[in-house]
Image (tube, rainbow, N blue to C red):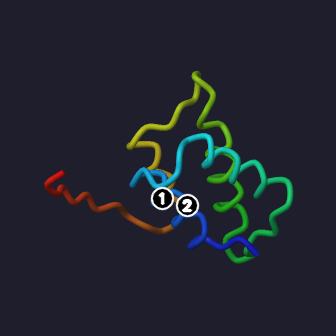
Amino acid sequence: MITREDVVETIRKYLQREITVTALVDWAESAMMDGEFDVKHFDDIRNVISRLGLADVRAFGLTWEDCDGLLGTLGYSTHVEIVVA
């Protein structure tokens, strides 16, 4: 079962460049086809995952603000930490 936490973790990995946009989209597409969503947050999870599935389409893209908004939909907020490279 896919939970809000699963979706948040996947977005975190994308934002921290642990996965590519292609991997994010692949995950979202698989989740939409095969996933069973937590019924408690079904609509929010489905809506966020469906949006992530469009991240590789130029007309839609996926900005930092988009991710922040999607995380907010799931009941989370973002925090940015800047560290020396």
Please identify the quarter of the rendering in which residue 5 is found: bottom right
Q: Residue 20, image x and y in percent? A: 53, 44
Front-most of residues 45 and 55: 55
Q: Which residue is mark 2?
A: 10
Mark 1: give few (<14), some (14-19) or many (20+) Cα within 10 Å: some
Q: Identify the residue at image location x=25%, y=57%.
A: 80
Secondary element at tag 2: helix
Name the outermost residue toward the front: 85
Secondary structure of the residue carrying tag 1 is helix
Q: Amino acid at mark 1?
A: Lys
Residue 13: numbered disc = 1
Q: Nearer the viewer, residue 4 or 26?
A: 26
Residue at the extreme right of the image, as rendered = 34
On-image quarter of the N terminus: bottom right
Where is residue 64 shown, x and y percent of the image? 39, 43
59 in relation to 31, above or below: above
Q: Nearer the viewer, residue 16 or 5?
A: 16
Residue at position x 78%, y 54% from top? 30
